[in-house]
Amino acid sequence: MIDGVIKFNVEHEYKDAPVFDAFEQLEALRTRLFALGLIGETPDGIGYGNVSHRFNNDASFFITATQTGKQPSLTQDEYTFIERYAFDSFTVFSKGKYKPSSESLSHAMIYEVHPDIGAVIHVHSSALWQMMIDTKSLATTAEYGTTEMVHEIAALYQSRNPFEHNAFVMKGHEDGIITFGKNIEEAEFRLYHIIANVLHNTKRGT
């Protein structure tokens, strides 16, 4: 087990990752989310929020590297390649200049839900988080980065269409919410829909 915020086993190779064609689009998304304060770093120096994108329509994907939340922009080297993963041993096998985000296995399970899921967004916002809890949105309760979290994500979509329920709130991970979609645009649109609901409810309350 890795010390610090990464809670799974990492078999990481410090070597060049494959060429990542979706990098510019994914990084543009991350830049927008950082500007909105949805990705960043806590006062005690812990990064939060991450994005990922499926690679070549298979089980591998790229995800922001661990502890990059404080950076307003990232280079391609700061995205880590998850070549494969094993839920039974709670292990990811990765390549790149940096180890992967602590939420990598949660992203992996979302990609496992349906082969057409192409992008995942994990952000932090107390307003969005509280609204989703108050409105009894789809939710997990486990602590982030744990086997329980991965199992809860799988359970959420055993009988639900993921493209009709492509967002959930992480009750066990304060301020954390996840959206996803067939592509970056769909995942981002779902997030903005949640933001719009918060703004609408806030306006009604004034």
Image (cartoon, rainbow, N blue to C red):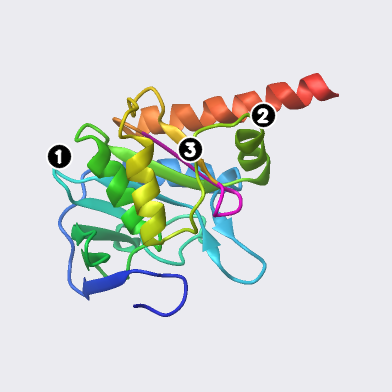
**Which residues are drawn in magenta?**
171-180
Q: Residue at x 28, y 61 (%)?
A: 80
Relative to residue 150, is residue 140 drawn left or right?
right
Horizontal and vertical percent for residue 113? Answer: 26, 38
**Separation (CA) of disc 2 from disc 3:** 15 Å
Residue 193 against residue 157 in the figure, above or below: above
Closer to viewer: mark 1 or mark 3: 3
Residue 75 visible from this viewpoint: no
**Separation (CA) of disc 1 from disc 2:** 34 Å
Q: Residues within 10 Å of mark 1 (few under 14, many from 20)?
A: few
Q: Amino acid at mark 1?
A: Asn
Mark number, residue 198? 2
Q: Secondary structure at mark 3?
A: strand
Q: Amino acid at mark 2?
A: Val
Q: Earlier in the sequence, mark 2 or mark 3?
A: 3
Q: Amino acid at mark 3?
A: Phe
Q: Is residue 177 magenta?
A: yes
Horizontal and vertical percent for residue 76? Answer: 30, 57
Which residue in the structure is indicated by mark 3? 168
Which residue in the structure is indicated by mark 1? 57
Horizontal and vertical percent for residue 107? Answer: 33, 49
Q: Earlier in the sequence, mark 1 or mark 3?
A: 1
Residue 194 visible from this viewpoint: yes
Q: Residue at x 23, y 50 (%)?
A: 61
Horizontal and vertical percent for residue 129? Answer: 61, 42
Relative to residue 147, is residue 176 drawn left or right?
right
User: Which quadrant is the C terminus positioned in?
Assistant: top right
Q: Is residue 79 magenta?
A: no
